[in-house]
Image (cartoon, rainbow, N blue to C red):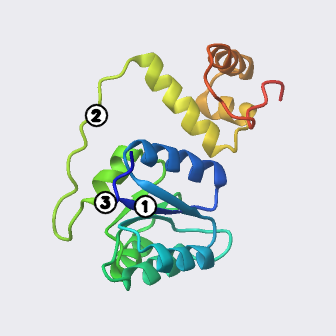
């Protein structure tokens, strides 16, 4: 059940990633709201007054830095984590100057993002305990992450992972047969 004091605004222009993040943080007890564009994120934040915000730096429509700036003037301001696939020192510094709590490069886990929410200026990032997982679980996590990075293109994912496309297709088909939800984006026949 979501805690009333943990309202999260996710600003991410990739609807699949936004949905995945929303699910992960809902399971962690947050009330989650998502926005795909800068203007809708700012309007939603003004109305909701979130306690936490996860903001993608590069949005298809608008700027994540514009969202950070608008969130930072809320009273009280939320804990803001900027998440980006285009990590650069200059943008990290700018995001922090505008009011971000922390800046993370994609891919980041929900556990890493939640730790970043707790970050305070001048302190080291808290150590994130890595759960002990088996090789198969690690392989599956890498496959999922790479699939998302390639827009669920099986051939490109296989190339990046250094495996034959048919091998990857068999692994995905086995997961699907086992009842795992792979989404409608994965085409085993590509």
- Pointer 2 or 1: first along the chain: 1
Query: Which residue is at the far left?
Result: 123
Residue 120 located left or right of residue 158: left
Query: Which residue is at the far bottom?
Result: 73
Which circle, 2 or 1, is nearer the viewer?
1
The spot of residue 88 in percent (x, y) is 45, 67
Between 68 and 134, which is closer to the camera in this rendering?
68
From the image, tell me which residue sits under label 3.
117
Name the quadrant of the C terminus. top right
Residue 111 located left or right of residue 178: left
Query: Which residue is at the far right?
Result: 189
Q: Secondary structure at mark 2?
A: loop
From the image, tell me which residue sits under label 2.
130
- Pointer 1 or 3: first along the chain: 1
User: Counting other residues with Cα less than 10 Å from the Cα at mark 2, is it few (<14), some (14-19), or many (20 or more)?
Assistant: few
Between 107 and 7, which is closer to the camera in this rendering?
7
Name which residue lies at 66% across and 30% down: 182
From the image, tell me which residue sits under label 1.
8
Q: CA distance from mark 1 to mark 3?
A: 11 Å
Name which residue lies at 59% across and 38% down: 146
Q: Is residue 105 above or below residue 145?
A: below
The spot of residue 24 in percent (x, y) is 46, 43
Between 166 and 1, which is closer to the camera in this rendering?
1
Q: CA distance from mark 2 to mark 3?
A: 18 Å
Which circle, 1 or 3, is nearer the viewer?
1
Which circle, 2 or 3, is nearer the viewer?
3
Marks 2 and 3 close (CB-CB < 8 Å): no
User: Counting other residues with Cα less than 10 Å from the Cα at mark 3, is it few (<14), some (14-19), or many (20 or more)?
Assistant: many
Q: Secondary structure at mark 3?
A: helix
């Amino acid at each position: 059940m979501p805690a009333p004091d943990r309202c999260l605004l996710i600003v991410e222009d990739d609807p699949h990633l936004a949905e995945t993040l929303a699910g992960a943080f809902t399971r962690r007890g947050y009330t989650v709201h998502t926005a795909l564009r800068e203007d809708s994120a700012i309007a939603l934040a003004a109305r909701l007054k979130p306690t936490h915000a996860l903001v993608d730096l590069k949005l298809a429509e608008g700027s994540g830095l514009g969202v950070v700036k608008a969130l930072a003037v809320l009273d009280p301001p939320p804990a803001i984590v900027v998440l980006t696939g285009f990590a650069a020192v200059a943008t990290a510094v700018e995001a922090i100057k505008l009011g971000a709590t922390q800046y993370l490069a994609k891919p980041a886990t929900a556990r890493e993002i939640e730790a970043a929410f707790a970050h305070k200026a001048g302190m080291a990032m808290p150590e994130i305990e890595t759960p002990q997982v088996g090789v198969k679980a690690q392989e599956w996590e890498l496959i999922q992450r790479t699939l998302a990075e390639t827009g669920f293109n099986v051939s490109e994912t296989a190339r990046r992972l250094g495996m034959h496309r048919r091998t990857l297709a068999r692994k995905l088909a086995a997961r699907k047969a086992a009842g795992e939800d792979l989404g409608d984006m994965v085409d085993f026949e590509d």
